[in-house]
Image (tube, coloured by chain):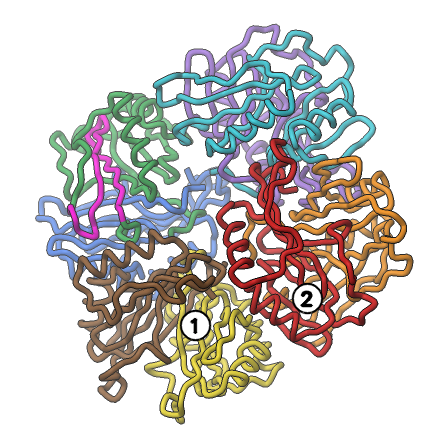
Chain colours: A orange, B red, C cyan, D purple, E green, F blue, G yellow, H brown
């Protein structure tokens, strides 16, 4: 188990702050913590994601899942399903639809990947064995 | 507070897996969870960091702190100081030495930034007001 | 101790939603959860406060502390002091400055009261005996 | 998750203290923490509600749900159902009977509203997605 | 550590229910959960004590500490001191004033004993080694 | 919820220490913490019960449930059932067999009562609404 | 419940460190914390197991379950089943296949025993009554 | 952090069960969970140690710290000091007196080692950086 009092933080580039608020708060249901001229900070599923306003050279026009993406691994299947429902219901763009990975292995997990308007890829996972979350 | 049973995960590029093990496990004191041919998975301060073996086009030769970096915000000053001691004692390369940011503001925090061998930047922070961790 | 998985919720009137965002998020450091045309929902120190856009008949021109106010009682003195520092540093309007109440009694506590732009009164308290928080 | 060691507190007007004890303790099953000449303090589902003895000018003769009400959002459906059972079994007056709101949306939740003898409205909710509790 | 979701319960005789409410709620700061004709139930420091209205044959005119008493062992010295302060400040009758027991042994602890109006003895303890709380 | 770091303690008379060890440890599955010449201390479902060696004048020859008994209220039905199974399987003497109390009321609970060899009565309960545990 | 912030540690002999890493990390899914010339340290299901490189005189050629073995007792059946699945799926050598012990007694539990390459025996258990875990 | 609901278990040989009870319960302050003809089970600092009655071939006449020992690593210095005080006060035999190891390194910790009557070695540790507990 991770320590609940610490917070992981991640900084990612976005091309427009209003668009980022609309996506992360309005769509994904994250909470807006702070807004500055050049960035917003988010309570992203309990951790901190900071969206920095960035020039086009930082926006990947054709993102691939490797080597860069981020997301949340849910211990409970229910929490995974809820985010999947939210993404479907609110018409969030899927980069990869839901499906199993490492089928039949101990590491088997369900995964889907969303794309934010600045082409950052966000993966949600659920392992059948929570020891494999690392 | 974040949910202690979920895990944030982040995938980053590295140019060499042995070098990454040496840095993240041998230096930073993270735990090696799994090793595959093309990546290693780490228990990074309670969350998951995956280092993907990547070609040189994914390694930033001259990294800047914005818009991409990741790290941990510690609730307790003691935990922050311990990682700072570890980095100093074990000669980890600092991208930015320790210092305050947003001095005298509510958002004031201490920060330092390490650089891994593949030029990923890792920031550790401690806010005097834990409500500002987001 | 209260159950950490439940949430108290409170609905209050505000005269302007942007002003409410500016006060609760920009000043008090609460997180914006959702925004609708007629209300905003906030993660207010871990509980939910909903600000409903309301006509002037709902805005009390000369509020008094009794019988209506709300707020947070902090178990730790440090958390109380941090909100006091925040309110001072960010020039939030005080309805009542900090001071003790029930001096020398078991119920002794420190208290200060803020006023939001719609004249809702928000009290923060810290008891020396946490059993008196109820 | 909210911090379990802190307490939300809310002050509301009541027209009679005995009546308030009868309602909040005898009916709703809250615990009486303290009684003074002019108010009672309650452990209300883990938070503090203070009922202040108030003149008739503070008692709303025809309350509406907006913009003022308070209550508890339960993470578990079972806890929601138990309070509903209690209110039914003990003949508490319903201001609004149980039903869904925001049907089929991510924010869908069950809700019912009770009325205390001083016309304060108390809403209990359960969201199918706990991330929507804020 | 004990399981926080379970509750120890103890039934004791009292000669008068109003007097018991006055002592346990008004003096000791316990919370009144329920009142019936023949008993009251209390949230006594997080556990349940039920005071049963009893004839004089159940009231011990000259109680001794052994073999019957009950109370709370606090892990933190601060919590112990707070109850001692409360008892002193509110003129609760002491059956035994505060002092050490098993001095210099591993089992050394501080203890004081209160007497309720029905001669039930209530002991509060604090061990310097919490492993000795059992 | 009660504080998990504190411990309720109860002292009760027993006529024989070996017999008490056999009953509380060998039958009920409590843990023996300490043994002195005149008493044993037990980890009794996470709280402390001390059995004091006592003369026959302290042993009630014909105990009644009121006004004196003690026990545990389990939040989960499963835990209640397990102790019931244990008592049945190990032929512990029942003072009252299992059954409901306050049928159909909010306070409805299951209860059974065991008798230790010194005629102390031990009640185990499970409420369908955990708010009624107090 | 045990204290989650402490760690049990156990030192055992192994004949080869690479082989031990392969078994404990690659097969059992434990995390490698540190590697020295003469030992590795592991996060073994949340506790610490240290494998010391040892001469053949420390390797038991024909191990028996008594008097020396170690392992984990899982509170949840699901967690027990997951490790059983992992051991089966990854062809870990079983010293004893899964089965019940103390059938129909309160102490009934499921158990299976694995053998590491240095003949240390590792037992996993699940009791139907968690009070019997000690 | 380890999962508080699981339990590590370790089986060790002892030459005499009464002697083992005297040492582990009477001296070390562990709790006796169960006693059978051929073994005792202990709540050893929150985990399970089982002492199996064993022939002399299982008792090591001249034990060495490596490769076999077990013990507890305390997160808090205070808890470490309390066990050290207990061992000193109750004249437990030290195999190694208290002192630092890996001085000035990140892995620096305090350690002492006790010897039980059957020559099992029990080490207690406290690291200045809790991340090194594994």
User: Residue C95 is drawn in which quadrant?
Assistant: top right
Residue at horizontal 48 percent and vertical 72 percent from the top = G41
Mark 1, other Cα within 10 Å: few <14 / some 14–19 / many ≥20: many
Secondary element at image label 1? strand
Is B74 in front, or is E81?
B74
Residue bounds of the magenta highlight? E102-128
Residue topped by disc 2: B117
Disc 2: host chain = B
User: Residue C63 is drawn in which quadrant?
Assistant: top right
Q: How many marks?
A: 2
Pinpoint residue G104: horizontal percent, then vertical percent. 40, 72
Secondary element at image label 2? loop
Residue at horizontal 39 percent and vertical 45 percent from the top = E7
**Is residue A17 rendered magenta in the image?**
no
Disc 1: host chain = G
Pinpoint residue D24: horizontal percent, then vertical percent. 51, 25
Relative to F122, residue E85 above or below: above
Residue topped by disc 1: G109
> Which mark identifies residue D28?
none
């Amino acid at each position: 188990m991770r320590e609940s009092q610490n917070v992981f933080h991640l900084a990612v580039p976005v091309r427009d702050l209003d668009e980022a608020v609309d996506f992360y708060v309005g769509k994904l249901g994250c909470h807006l913590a702070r807004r500055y001229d050049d960035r917003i900070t988010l309570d992203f599923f309990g951790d901190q994601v900071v969206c920095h306003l960035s020039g086009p050279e930082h926006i990947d026009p054709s993102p691939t899942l490797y080597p860069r993406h981020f997301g949340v691994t849910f211990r409970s299947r229910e929490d995974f399903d809820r985010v999947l429902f939210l993404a479907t219901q609110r018409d969030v763009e899927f980069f990869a639809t839901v499906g199993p990975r490492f089928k039949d292995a101990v590491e088997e997990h369900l995964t889907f990947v969303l794309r934010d308007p600045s082409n950052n890829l966000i993966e949600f996972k659920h392992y059948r064995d929570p020891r494999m979350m690392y």
